[in-house]
Image (cartoon, rainbow, N blue to C red):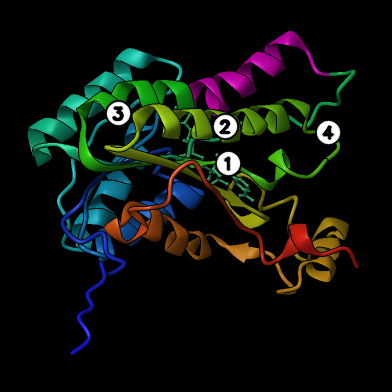
Amino acid sequence: MVEYTHTPVSVSGKRAVVVGGTSGIGQAIALGFAEEGADVIATSRSEEKVDETAAAIEERGANTARITCDVTDAASLDAVRETAVEEFGGVDVVVASQGAISRATVLGISDDEWDFVTDVALDGVRKVTQAFAPAMDEGGSIINISSLAAQLSMANLPAYSAAKGGVDAFTRVSAKELAPDVRVNAIAPGFVITPQNADTYAEGTEKRARIDERAPIGRVAEREEMVGAAVFLGSDASSYVTGEVITVDGGFSDSAF
Ligand SMILES: NC(=O)c1ccc[n+]([C@@H]2O[C@H](COP(=O)([O-])OP(=O)(O)OC[C@H]3O[C@@H](n4cnc5c(N)ncnc54)[C@H](O)[C@@H]3O)[C@@H](O)[C@H]2O)c1
């Protein structure tokens, strides 16, 4: 008789908050979690987008709550946490998917542009962690959305790349400090079609052709293709995974020719 059991990859019954969850990758993760049986709050600055995404979560049979936040304002994140605790009784999974970008050069970027990007993309991750980790019980999972830009040089993205490199490092330190109760990991997407970059990666552009040629999978990603990694990291099936950056890039970063 061989005894064997394993934890299935499931977020059913989890209580999740997705910051930056009303557009693009974050919205896909919020809706994906709802379809997989989690309760989900998807939050961002826009009341209209929060409303729209909450309705889509409810359509999938999941519980939600409607609340806006701005990741540059810690008090607004505290309010989201309090809402999750009131409505769901706690928080098991937090995803930081807020995004900000500037395409200025290393020598051309202004203080304001630098601060705008790093305040949202890096300091926002710190604020999300500080707001939610203390309320998370054993088995908690924080998922920071990083980027391939933390690993490969991309011209005209100095603040974004530095912020994402910081997110990877902050993820590792958070994982160490919050273990064993809360696991902290990151997902580094490659090139994903979302509102943020629909023009840059549009079909027929030179950039799109170069991505399609270099990525072994042969194309850019759909935002839904980021959801599987998030479900895995949010699930107890990843109970021994912490401090990791999971790259989801169609093989792009490993491909030379
Ligand atoms: N799309 C890609 O190709 C790609 C690649 C690598 C990494 N990423 C990362 O994925 C994440 C999601 O990006 P996306 O492409 O889905 O972009 P998106 O613009 O569709 O979504 C970003 C979300 O962040 C929210 N947001 C922005 N500023 C905020 C603030 N101050 N407070 C609260 N919410 C705020 C927006 O409202 C939106 O909901 C970002 O961290 C981005 O850097 C995206």
Measure the alpha-carbon separation of dots 1 and 3: 18 Å
* Label 1 beta carbon within 8 A of ligand 1: yes
Horizontal and vertical percent position of residue 113: 70, 17
Q: Secondary structure at mark 1?
A: loop
Give the dominant element type of the magenta stretch: helix, strand or loop: helix
Instruction: Report the residue marked by disc 3.
Output: 133
Instruction: Report the residue marked by disc 2.
Output: 167
Instruction: Report the residue marked by disc 4.
Output: 156
- Residue occupying the point 8% across, 31% down: 86
Please tell me whether residue 115 belongs to the stretch shown in magenta: yes
Contact between labelled residues 4 and 2, with CB atoms less than 8 Å apart: no
Residue 247 drawn above or below residue 102: below
Horizontal and vertical percent position of residue 250: 67, 66
Q: Is residue 7 left or right of residue 123?
A: left
Contact between labelled residues 2 and 3, with CB atoms less than 8 Å apart: no
Measure the alpha-carbon separation of dots 4 and 3: 34 Å
Q: Hey, what amino acid is under mark 4?
A: Asn
Q: Mark 3 or mark 1, which is nearer the start of the sequence?
A: 3
